[in-house]
Amino acid sequence: MKLLLDSVWRAAAYLFMPRVIGLTLLPLVVAGGLTLVTGYFFYEPAVDGVRNWLETWSLTEAVLRWLDLHAGTSFRAMMAIIIVLAVAIPVVVVLSLLLVAAFMTPALVSLVAERRFPGLERLRGGNFWRGLAVSLGATLLALVALLLSAPLWLVPPLALIIPPLIWGWLTTKVMSFDALAEHASEAERLRIRERHHWPLLFIGVITGYLGAAPTLLWAVSAATLILAPFLIVVSIWLYTLVFAFSALWFVHYCLGALRDDRLIVAGNAAAAARQATDLRELSVAGPGSDYDFQRDVPPQPPVLPPA
């Protein structure tokens, strides 16, 4: 708990450093540029295609008539935009996470290591291609889980539980690997992830809930849907900030856990070396020797004659 609390306030403090704010601009430029270009060429055709699909699919006709009756005829026109955004926003979230993991996390690891752990040895147990494989594999599993669990989102309590858990698992999988790839060996990384499984998952879930905050932009009014391509760019920067905070939290926690783990291993190794030295000296001195008596038999109190 001490390590968890120490890492969260340090992550919050580092987030407002000018160097970290500057690092958030690269994912914003890449993801924002891709979003604007894609929206310019495909946004209106996608909305028109979804609208035509809704009007020609007989299964949705009863739902649309019910919406016209209770929400007004204008809501039918918004349904296509809502569906397009519901598909696009998870893609934007995943893209932001992968960009932060690829471009920001290595720089944040170096920043934290230089300021807090300058003497921590870099064993380089992970590499870029392995990290990319872990990120892409975990992302694919998370998208499949989101797709399969989408019908459960219609149940209000589950809609507030399932997506953050999935995003939390994905964030934990990606960020914990990247935070330890440079400094920890593979054995150390696996040992830390096993010993600190629940705290790491807790960090991921909390940042998963924080990642839901940018979606509140769409809840302001229906008029925000008209500015959807530009609001998605704003959302990307907010997602980037959330994932930057998440990366800093994981880096501070994981490097602190790695330092403590190495201190424990070094202490155990020193104790084992002392014990081995004592056994060698005992075997040389032989049983019953003065060395054996002095080292292995605790001093006895003097025996006083009876009064």
Image (cartoon, rainbow, N blue to C red):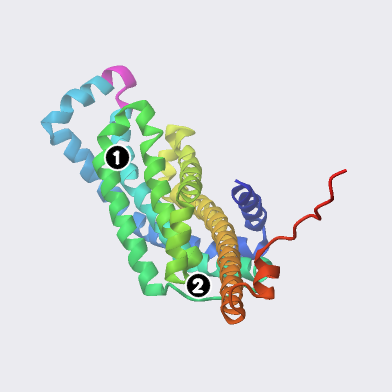
| Above or below: residue 98 compared with residue 200 | below
Q: At x 39% / y 42%, what residue is drawn?
A: 165
* Residue 102 placement: quadrant: bottom left
Which label is found at residue 83?
Answer: 1
Tag count in the figure? 2
- Look at the image and tell me whether residue 209 can be seen: yes
Kind of residue sitting beneath label 1: Ile
Q: Is residue 57 inside the magenta stretch?
A: no
The residue at which mark 2 appears reads as: 182
Q: Residue 75: horizontal and vertical position, in percent?
A: 32, 28
Amino acid carrying label 2: it is Glu
Please give the range of residues in magenta: 68-74
Residue 284: image x %, image y %? 59, 82
- Which residue of the protein is positioned furthest toward the bottom in this rendering? 284
The structure residue drawn at horizontal position 28% and vertical position 32%, both measured from the top left corner, is 152
| Quarter containing the C terminus | top right
The mark lying in front, picked from 2 and 1, is 2
Residue 203, compared with residue 224, is above or below; it is below
